[in-house]
Image (cartoon, rainbow, N blue to C red):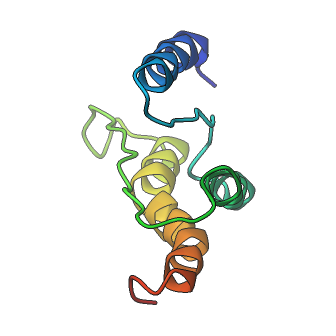
Amino acid sequence: MQAVWPARRKNERIVTKINAGGGRAVFVQCNAALAADCQRTVMIAAEIFGRLDIVFNNAGIIRRANVIGTTEDEWDRVMDVNVKSIFLMSKYAVPEIVKQGGGTA
């Protein structure tokens, strides 16, 4: 598994700038291919901001290899991040959005 610490520091700096400028932001590290992480992320957002109005699924990775050079584990990882994560984040976010009278299930 790759280290995510440099990205975390960058995102925390962005959150600091947003908050210093009068906005409200929070950084939540999440493996969007894991149901528990998606559920936790949605719960944190709803708790901190009091509601959830939108979900923007933008996780994605790419494996630069042909079918012969790609292992099954690599393929599964791409599908988990690029496809499964959209389902999982939506699964937990949509009910929170619907609570606000928006979105569709």
Q: Where is residue 62 drawn, in percent x and y?
A: 32, 38
User: At 67% from the left edge and 49% from the top edge, which residue is drawn?
Assistant: 48
In this picture, residue 37 sits left or right of residue 90: right
Q: Where is residue 100 drawn, in percent x and y?
A: 51, 80
User: At 72% from the left edge and 54% from the top edge, which residue is drawn?
Assistant: 40
Image-quadrant location for residue 69: top left
User: At 63% from the left edge and 61% from the top edge, which residue is drawn?
Assistant: 50
Image-quadrant location for residue 36: bottom right
Q: Where is residue 41 drawn, in percent x and y?
A: 65, 51
In this picture, residue 105 sits left or right of residue 29: left
Q: Closest to the observer: 97 or 82? A: 97
Q: Closest to the observer: 82 or 50? A: 50
Q: Where is residue 81 drawn, in percent x and y?
A: 47, 50
Q: Against 39, is 1 above or below?
A: above
User: At 51% from the left edge and 77% from the top edge, which residue is drawn?
Assistant: 94
Q: Quadrant of the N terminus?
A: top right
Q: How many marks?
A: 0
Q: Against 86, is 77 above or below?
A: above
